[in-house]
Amino acid sequence: MDFFVHFFQDALFAAIAAIGFAAISRPPRQAYLWCALIAAVGHSTRFLLMQALSPGMHIVIATTLASFVIGILAVLISPKAHVPAETCLFPSLLPMIPGMYAYRTFGGLAMCLFGSTEQSFSHSFFLFANNGLTCFFILLGMAVGATVPIFLFPDISFRATRS
Amino acid sequence: MNTQLVIWLCIAAFAMLVILVRGLEVLRHHSHHTRQRIIELATESEELFIPGDQSENDNTYNDID
Amino acid sequence: MCDFMARYAVWLFGSGSTCIRLEKNLQRIAAAAGVEVEITVLPRHIHLTVREPADGDTVTTIASIRPLPVSYDLITRLSRLSWDIADGSLPCDRADTELDNIISSARSDIPGLPLLVGAANASFCRLFGGDAIAMGVVFVATVAGFILKQMLAERHTDPRIIVIACSFVSAVLAAADGLFGLGATPAVAIGSSVLYLVPGIPFINSFSDMIDGHYICAFGRMMQAVVITCCLSAGLCFGMFLMNIGMF
């Protein structure tokens, strides 16, 4: 029961986050709700893959698969909403952007400069490299997973705004 | 009062100032579009209309053919 | 036609479109106009070559990419414009006027945007394990930071300065959670207070362009996103340093 509560909470807050961050990118009005729905499905897919499976899937692989689900949904929904696939797709990916990994990477790099001992430098460099690689591969997995459906269904993706 | 608290209070005051200024900017922008004047000056013909008055814009020439 | 396509490309690319969409839309417009087009996308310029197959005349133009806010509404309307031209419902000689109409009626930010972004960032805080107090603190910090961002952006401040200033203000305000001992997750509050500044769309666009083979454009967008993230880290680190909070 606890797991289901966490699952629905994850979906709900991902939907709210998607609406808020999508609004910064000024999507067309009809895209807001679709972005929320797609983001909720994608983020809870990642939650399921990382928490429900035992052992939990690595964040990079889980993000790639969740992005693929988001990509498929965005491509299928784009003709109905008369918006390009990226309009529903990219804002829906925003809740999964590894923001914390990104700024910890540069924080670690800055701390390398201030480390006086080999141990502190090694620790800072480990933080820089670990966070940096995780961030890079999450973004790569996200982009690959999300854009593969666009190339699998080019007819739908590039004709969605055709009246 | 420790240093962190002082810094926090300064930044919080600055943030409140920013929000206040932004709110005033937004209100001023809105009021520019829907301005209602309380006191206005108009010409006598706009204040008092008597049937038969000719408006300034009427280009009627009494051409009698 | 070359000038029209150059303006169209600048506005479409500047609004945050991927290179592949830009290429497809331009080729669609070119096919409808009976010409051939090749484009080269560089970080700050777009090179366009339009060729008339009938007589072999070639026109090349270089247009500067202007820094525009990301706008999927504009991308949608510009994509629709390319289809209208391709389907013949909009004649090519009226395309320029229609482009002007689309640009001039570009939507500005919605009124309650700072509150919406605040709610979004507070949701992020929850997703990272923050408690209700942390969510409230992050909401307030985000609203204040975002309003500052809007004000500075309207005054055409350099985007890097904007990000440093806003991340600093948000981080210091979010430090209230730990400073006043309000909640149980102060580290999550500070960590998630600046996430609204992370350049998510440039990151995704850069990887998308890389997959499509536009490596120069991908690198340019990646550098732009990395610079903004560095500025975000700088503001956050400075704020945490002043608040005497360790990063790791």
Image (cartoon, helix red, strand yellow):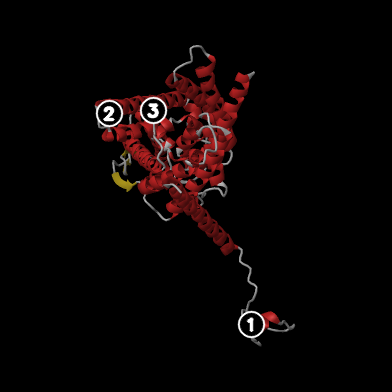
Label 2, on which residue? A121
For the view shown, which residue lies furthest in the top direction?
A54
Dot 3: element? helix
Check disc 1 and give the amino acid type: Thr
Pick the front one: C228 or A67: C228
Which of the pair C10/C232 is nearer the observer? C232
Mark 3, residue position = A135
Q: Are marks 3 and 1 in contact (CB under 8 Å)?
A: no
The residue beneath circle 1 is B43
List x then y, in percent, for residue A108. Answer: 33, 32
- Give residue C175's mark: none
Label 3 Cα crowd, 10 Å radius (few <14 / some 14-19 / many 20+): many
Residue at the image position 47 percent from the left and 33 percent from the top:
C187
Secondary element at tag 2:
helix
Q: Residue at x 41, y 35 (%)?
A: C18
The front one of B10 and A159 is B10
Label 1: state its secondary structure: loop
Whether residue C11 is visible: no
Q: Earlier in the sequence, mark 3 or mark 2?
A: 2
Chain holding disc 2 = A
Q: CA distance from mark 1 to mark 2?
A: 81 Å
The three-letter amino acid code for the residue at tag 3 is Cys
Task: Indicate the position of residue B20 as horizontal and vertical percent values.
Answer: 53, 56
Distance from label 3 to label 1 (Cα)? Answer: 71 Å
Determine the image quadrant of residue C58. top left
Outermost residue on the front side: it is: B1
